[in-house]
Amino acid sequence: MKSKKWTDNEENLLLEELSEGLNIKAIALLHSRTIGGINSRKNVLVYRMYQNHYNIDEISECIKLNKNYVKHLIHKKNNISHHDEVDQLRKDIIKLKIFINDLKINNWKIKYS
């Protein structure tokens, strides 16, 4: 089952509710979402705040998460992003090698035609 898309307004409301220390079950009911959906969005918000230059203390206080857990989420997301970049670089290198090889073959054909 596909979940409904989060709106900016709903995310802002979620941040307010988290900052006020509302219970996750209550938040889930208010948003008509699952507890897992709320926790997942919390993780998204942690990384988004980090990208917007909030420090660990600010994120921890706003979302009501342990500082070490906030650091863990950020580190985990950074590693995933890094792996995606490395995978893309590998694909680009393979394409470049194929392109260079094709150039060599075509150059050889031109020289010896």
Image (cartoon, grey):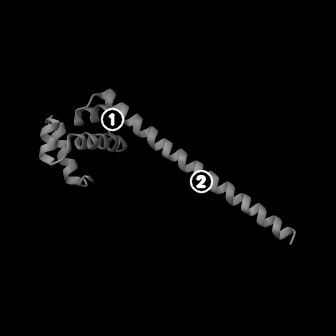
Image coords of residue 29 (percent x, y) = 12, 44
In the image, 32: left or right of 75?
A: left
User: Residue 92 has which mark?
Assistant: 2
- Which image quarter holds the C terminus? bottom right
- As drawn, the residue found furthest toward the bottom would be 113
The residue type indicated by label 2 comes to: Asp
The residue type indicated by label 1 comes to: Asn
Work out how far the residue at label 1 is from the one at label 2, CA to CA, in angstroms: 34 Å
In the image, 76: left or right of 32?
A: right
Q: Nearer the viewer, residue 101 or 68?
A: 101
Image coords of residue 102 (percent x, y) = 72, 62
Q: In which quarter of the view is residue 18 placed? A: top left
Give whichever of discs 1 and 2 has the lower sequence position.
1
Q: Read off the residue under disc 1.
A: 55
Image coords of residue 35 (percent x, y) = 20, 40
Considering only vertical position in the picture, is 66 above or below 3?
above
Pointer 1 local density, CA inside 10 Å: few below 14, some 14–19, many at least 20: few
Under tag 2, what secondary structure? helix
